[in-house]
Image (tube, helix red, strand yellow):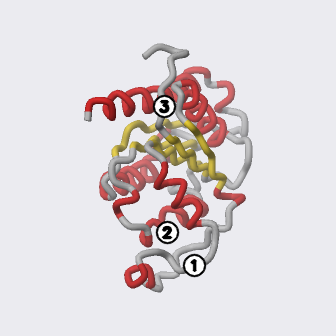
Amino acid sequence: MRRGEKVVGVNVLGVAGSPRRGGNTETILDEVLSGAREAGASTEKVVLAEADIRPCRACNACSRTGSCVIKDDMAAAVEKMEAAGVLILATPVYWWGPTAQMKAFIDRWYGVPREAFRGKRVILAVSSGGSGSYAELTIKMIGEIIPYLGMENYRTLQASGANSKASAQGNSKLLREAWDAGFNSVKTLTEYKSRI
């Protein structure tokens, strides 16, 4: 598939985990979504900082009811996640881990049936100040969760040394990698689906 060719039937959901709008994490996420749209996918973005997604209370009601009993925006986010073939998780690194917003979102997956995750392709986008080692624990943590839930860890994008809000905007190599990840995730998923 070449640039400009379109595919149909793939939904891509981007999840922005930064509490700050328009920063490095969202810049990378938007570029991935742009590549996916160019390949013909339907795209949507959930901005966790603007959603009411509360932390898991460990009440275990979900094990009895089959879904989380907390009444907030998580049910709508899960619905969007279930409809997506590609999921993009984008978070900056805060104290060697994902943001509180992203961690709360992932923790709430405990109340989501595993079938909702199986077979999804995941692109992880992580930005951090300092060296690449700052992001290692975040990448490892989320990278372990992805296959545990039956998803494919398709690609990890890492923006190290992103010390200013606009660092990613000036990194043409990273932006190209992000665009390509979005485009190719849709392209190869569509090719796979056409063979089964």
The residue at 65%/41% (across/down) is 26
Number of dots carrying numbers: 3
Task: Point out residue 180 in the picture as x, y percentages from the top left corner.
Answer: 49, 24
Query: The C terminus is located in which quarter?
Result: top left
User: Which residue in the structure is indicated by mark 2?
Assistant: 108
The three-letter code of the residue at mark 3 reads: Val
How far is the residue under mark 3 from the one under mark 2? Answer: 30 Å
Which quadrant holds residue 195? top left
Q: Which residue is drawn at 33% across and 58% down?
A: 149
Kindly check if marks 1 and 2 are in contact, taking CB atoms under 8 A apart as contact: yes
Q: Which of marks 1 and 2 is nearer the N terminus?
A: 1
Horizontal side of residue 99 vs 148, given as left or right? right
Residue in the picture at 42% in, 27% down? 187
Q: Residue 15 carries which label?
A: none
Nearest to N terminus: mark 1 or mark 3: 3
Q: In this view, does 180 lie above or below 91?
A: above
Amino acid found under the numbered disc labelled 2:
Arg
Mark 1 highlights which residue? Answer: 70
